[in-house]
Image (cartoon, helix red, strand yellow):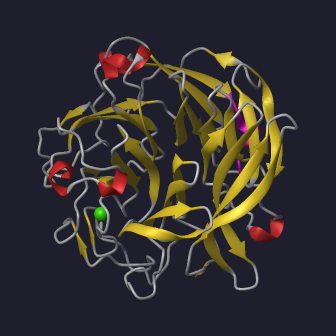
């Protein structure tokens, strides 16, 4: 296994991907963006990115259906990985050399089942110096006595001189604890806002009672969490939000998996309900599914997504590309990973010129209504993209379920 060796850029061709889709604003929800067609993209779009592959198989969780590690970047370009064979291992990795270095393990064998989904779901950096970093780490935790699962966020101190981690105070534990034989839809994605605050996504955990607001508690929500304080619910009605990012320091965006299609990109506004499981733009569920949506093919009555995908692309992490340096020609576009579509999705937004009147979930209603998706472009990479991070030097990295770290840079002006 040639770990750490840079391989030649992959050929970004794939037999089953759609052409880039230009979407007129406003987005017409009756005209879903179909990414599962058989058209080959124009060659020019395959040349937008240079993608190098670095072997990272030792950081995978599970056998068979393996899961790529969670990913975060420190200021000096060191990458932090969460996962590994035991699911709860935090590792440091310098893409220029060597194997990932194990810093410590956060999950005991009793706190998980032997399933690749019982793994660290995200890592966020709260603050850092050359000697230490304060991290937030999220994961689904199995309560063996009650045979149920909860989403946990804990602070972790990373001693960079000793190269080890120590768990700190727990920030959040989701309720209710959901009885399961295998976890699904945990979400658990983090976005650090400052040293004391972060946003957290909590999926529906496959909870059959998700349609009962009096029982579902924290499930299907975005929470604003802080050290030593209860979480504050920001929004609800999210099925499985695998990506969260703050665009231009103002617009809080969420990517989420719909059922049988109906994957969404949402602009988060405080207090809103984003519809799950009452409405979905996906297709009807079958008898035997854990929940049957009340209405399918519509989003009426709930805050609609900025755009959506039918059939499913299974979107994961989303980052905003730097507006300066090598990426400047991309003008702050978003780059989003996908599992099922095995692609990176470029999303160009049209944002109001006057900006918002707040930050994240506190943006003004009038300004939020002007946010549009201007263009969606699919860039196939041929692997299931689990997490994406951008370094302060402007290099984008992505982890995959196949065990590669992808190093992504712009090849030329798009
Ligand atoms: Ca929705």
Q: Quick check: 234 above or below 408?
A: below
The quadrant in which the N terminus is found is top right
Q: Residue 230: x, y in percent?
A: 55, 72
Give the camera-side residue of 330 and 45: 330
Q: Is residue 58 magenta?
A: yes
Q: Does 210 sit left or right of 59 as displayed?
A: left
Single out the residue that lies furthest toward the right.
Answer: 162
State how many labels appear: 0
- Magenta run includes residue 30: no
Query: Where does the image place residue 314, in percent across and percent down from the top left?
Result: 42, 51
Q: Is residue 13 above or below residue 228?
A: above
Q: Quadrant of residue 100?
A: top right
Query: Which residue is located at x 68 percent, y 29 percent?
Result: 78
User: Over which residues does the magenta segment extend?
Assistant: 55-62
Q: Work out whether residue 144 or residue 272 is closer to the camera in this orientation and state it.
A: 272
Q: Is residue 296 above or below residue 378?
A: below
Q: Is residue 312 visible in this depiction of the protein?
A: no
| Residue 191 % position (x, y) | 50, 49
- Give the residue displayed 61% in from the left and 43% down from the top: 125
Quadrant for ligand 1? bottom left
Name the side, left or right, on which 101 lies relative to 50. Answer: right
| Image vertical order of residue 217 relative to residue 33, above or below | below
């Amino acid at each position: 296994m040639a770990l750490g060796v840079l391989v030649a850029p992959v050929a970004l061709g794939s037999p089953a991907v759609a052409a880039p889709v230009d979407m007129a604003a406003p987005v017409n929800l009756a005209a879903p963006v179909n990414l599962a067609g058989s058209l080959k993209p124009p060659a020019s779009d395959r040349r937008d990115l240079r993608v190098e592959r670095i072997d990272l198989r030792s950081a995978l969780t599970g056998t068979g259906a393996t899961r790529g590690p969670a990913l975060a970047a420190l200021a000096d370009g060191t990458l932090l990985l969460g996962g590994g064979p035991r699911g709860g291992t935090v590792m440091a990795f310098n893409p220029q050399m060597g194997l990932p270095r194990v810093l410590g393990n956060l999950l005991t064998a009793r706190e998980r089942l032997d399933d690749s989904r019982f793994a660290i779901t995200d890592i966020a950096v709260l603050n850092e110096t050359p000697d230490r970093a304060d991290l937030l780490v999220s994961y689904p935790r199995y309560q063996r006595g009650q045979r149920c699962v909860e989403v946990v966020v804990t602070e972790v101190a990373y001693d960079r001189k000793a190269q080890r981690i120590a768990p700190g105070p727990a920030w959040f534990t989701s309720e209710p604890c959901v009885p399961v034989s295998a976890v699904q839809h945990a979400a658990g994605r983090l976005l650090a806002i400052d040293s004391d605050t972060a946003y957290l996504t909590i999926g529906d955990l496959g909870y059959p009672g998700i349609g009962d607001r009096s029982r579902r508690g924290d499930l299907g929500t975005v929470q604003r969490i802080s050290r030593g304080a209860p979480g504050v619910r920001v929004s609800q009605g999210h099925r499985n939000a695998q990506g969260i990012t703050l665009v231009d320091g103002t617009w809080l965006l969420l990517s989420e998996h719909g059922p049988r299609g109906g994957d969404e990109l949402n602009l988060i506004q405080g207090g809103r309900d984003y519809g799950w499981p009452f409405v979905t733009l996906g297709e009807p569920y079958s008898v035997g599914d854990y929940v049957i949506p009340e209405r399918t093919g519509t989003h009426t009555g709930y805050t609609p997504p900025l755009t959506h995908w039918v059939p499913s692309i299974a979107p994961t992490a989303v980052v905003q590309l730097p507006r300066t340096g090598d990426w400047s020609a991309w003008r702050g576009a978003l780059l989003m990973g996908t599992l099922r579509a095995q692609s990176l999705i470029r999303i160009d937004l049209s944002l109001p010129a006057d900006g918002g009147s707040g930050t994240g979930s506190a943006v003004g209603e009038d300004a939020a209504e002007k946010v549009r998706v201007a263009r969606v472009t699919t860039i196939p990479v041929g692997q299931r993209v689990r997490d994406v991070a951008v370094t302060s030097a402007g290099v984008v990295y992505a982890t995959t379920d196949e065990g590669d770290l992808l190093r992504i840079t712009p090849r030329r002006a798009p």
